[in-house]
Image: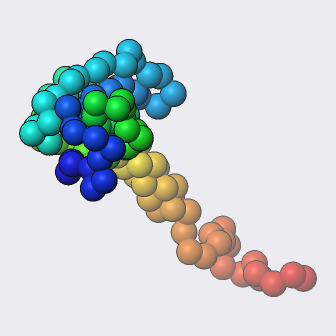
Amino acid sequence: WSPPEHPNGILTGYSLQYQPFNGSRAGRTLQEVFSPNQTRFTLARTDPVSRYRFSLKARTQVGDGEAMRAESPVIVNEAYTKSQVDIATQGWFIGLMCAIALLVLILLIVCFIKRSKGGKYPVREQKDVPLGPE
């Protein structure tokens, strides 16, 4: 952040409040106090899914200034992506796909056997029996 453009007195420091949240669940609000020359804060994220709400106020001899509010963006870092498991490498998923492939193969074999049993043309017992609707 940058210092206030129009401070109402001599700047004595900053007050930063931040609160982790995940969806509708919010954690407890934490507060940090900084000297007037410090304009940077790095938060070590312990939970890769949670986001944070920040509220920053500049402090002067007169009192606290207007709060500047922001939320952390959704960041997917390397540690989070490495902890995710690929479904294609799961044993149950591979077994399920093999079972489906086996069932499709059996179904195809049954269809080919049924098709080969019946001929293209109707079978006649005697040559002199007409095939028409007489």
Q: In this view, does 57 lie to the left or right of 88?
A: right
Q: Where is residue 34 in the image (x, y as percent from the top left)?
A: 16, 28
> Residue 11, position in %: x, y?
21, 38
Q: Is residue 18 visible?
A: no
Q: Which residue is drawn at 21% across and 24% down?
A: 33
| Residue at left offset 28%, top offset 41% | 9
Residue 31 visible (yes or no): yes
Residue at image point 37% right, 43% down = 68
Looking at the image, which residue sits at the far left?
37
Query: In the image shown, does 123 or 48 lie closer to the viewer?
Result: 48
Please identify the residue farthest to the right as the structure is shown. Answer: 134
Which of the two residues, 75 or 54, is positioned nearer the viewer here?
54
How many marks the image carries: the answer is 0
Q: Please identify the residue farthest to the top as the structure is shown.
A: 28
Query: From the image, which quarter does the C terminus lie in?
Result: bottom right
Q: Which of 97 and 129 is in front in this view?
A: 97
On the rendered structure, is 120 left or right of 66? right
Percent x, y for residue 111?
49, 55
Name the image quarter holding residue 113. bottom left
Residue 10 in the image: above or below residue 34: below
User: Percent position (x, y) of residue 126?
Assistant: 67, 73
Which residue is at a point 47% across and 31% down the rendered structure image? Answer: 23
How is colour applied across the structure in the image? rainbow
Hey, which quadrant is residue 46 in on the image?
Answer: top left
Q: Quick one: 128 or 31, which is closer to the camera?
A: 31
